[in-house]
Amino acid sequence: MAARQTLTHFWLKLLGTFSLVRGNNIALLALTQYLIAYYIMAPEGPFRKVWFDLQLFCLVLASSLVVSAGYILNNFFDAAKDQINRPKKYLLRHLLSQREQLTLFFILNMIAVIVAAAVSFKAVLFFGCYSLAIYAYSVFFKRLYWVSNGVAAFLVLLPFYVLALYYDFHETTVYILAIYLFLLLLIRDLIKDLANYKGDFAQRYQTLPIVFGATKTKLIISCIVFLAAIPLWYLLEVLTASWRYFFLGSYPLLLILLPILWRASTQKMYLWLHNIVKTLIFFGVLSIYWSNK
């Protein structure tokens, strides 16, 4: 009986750790990096050269480790508000004690630096600075409503910039694509803030919905949606015919979401909209396959 309880406790902790580091997000990050490397930055190279590139694997692994550590740190500082906003996930993610979470945070960052050292000293500097930036966001920027969402979206994009450095790939189209993705991430984060209003207010977080109210936040989101038309217009002019279909479909969907956003008033509705934007980003990742078709 004791052995069975120990085994059950182990699996529950493992599941809690997977949820803590957002295992599904990490898997998507790694997949996206490989798709970008093969289909955008090195499309002429043979399959094996990219997918079995040891240095690329180290960059992807280091990215996954640092981002995982960032999720742990974010969970550590957001424990009180998550207990209000997402009580079920809170219970799962806090099967690990705060001491265990901090220990895992340092271990993951340390392994990331060691892995990056197998690529170059510049990679070590990049991931060292990236880890510090995530720490600065969690401790300082996250409570500044006027920059927090922008910094969060920017940090999500940094693991892809390391690929541009690795392949010395700096085409304008990729940066315009990054701007469009940045705006989608910004929309997603602002909708998430609307959903988390209760917990943020209780813990005195200074988010846009708390400072300006839900109506003005929705107006800001609407402006960002229309602003996204600028990079989208450029992308539709330069992308291949097959890849263009995704962008032709994604923007009208964002416009359709706006009236639903303005009618939304409950956490459930906001989370539903948040998940739709996440799904849109996911299909954007899959669409990379058609970037050279």
Image: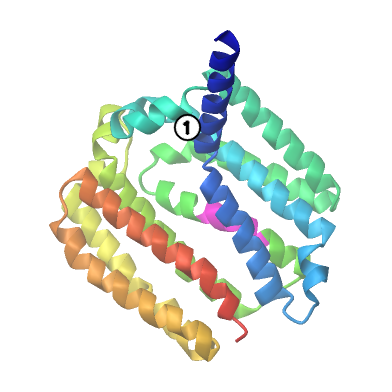
Task: Give the extent of the magenta segment.
Answer: 154-161
Disc 1 target residue: 75
Q: How many marks?
A: 1
Q: Nearer the viewer, residue 101 or 220?
A: 101
Query: Does residue 159 belong to the magenta stretch?
Result: yes
**Vertical placement of residue 49 versus 56, above or below:** below
The residue depicted at 22 percent of the width and 61 percent of the height is 219
Q: How many residues crowd around disc 1 within 10 Å: few (fewer than 14), some, or many (20 or more)?
A: many
Above or below 218: residue 1: above
Task: Indicate the quadrant where residue 206 lies.
Answer: top left
The kind of residue on which mark 1 rests is Asn
Position above or below: 27 against 93: below
Percent x, y for residue 123? Answer: 78, 51
What is the residue that sits farthest to the front in this orientation? 1
Magenta residue check for 228: no
Element class at badge 1:
helix
Q: Is residue 139 left or right of residue 219?
A: right
Residue 86, given in percent of the width and then of the height, sits at: 33, 34
Q: Quadrant of the N terminus?
A: top right
Residue 174 horizontal side relative to residue 273, left or right: right
Q: Position of residue 239 (x, y in %)?
A: 54, 86
- The secondary structure making up most of the magenta span is helix
Quadrant where the C terminus sits is bottom right
For image coordinates 70% across by 63% down, the residue present is 163
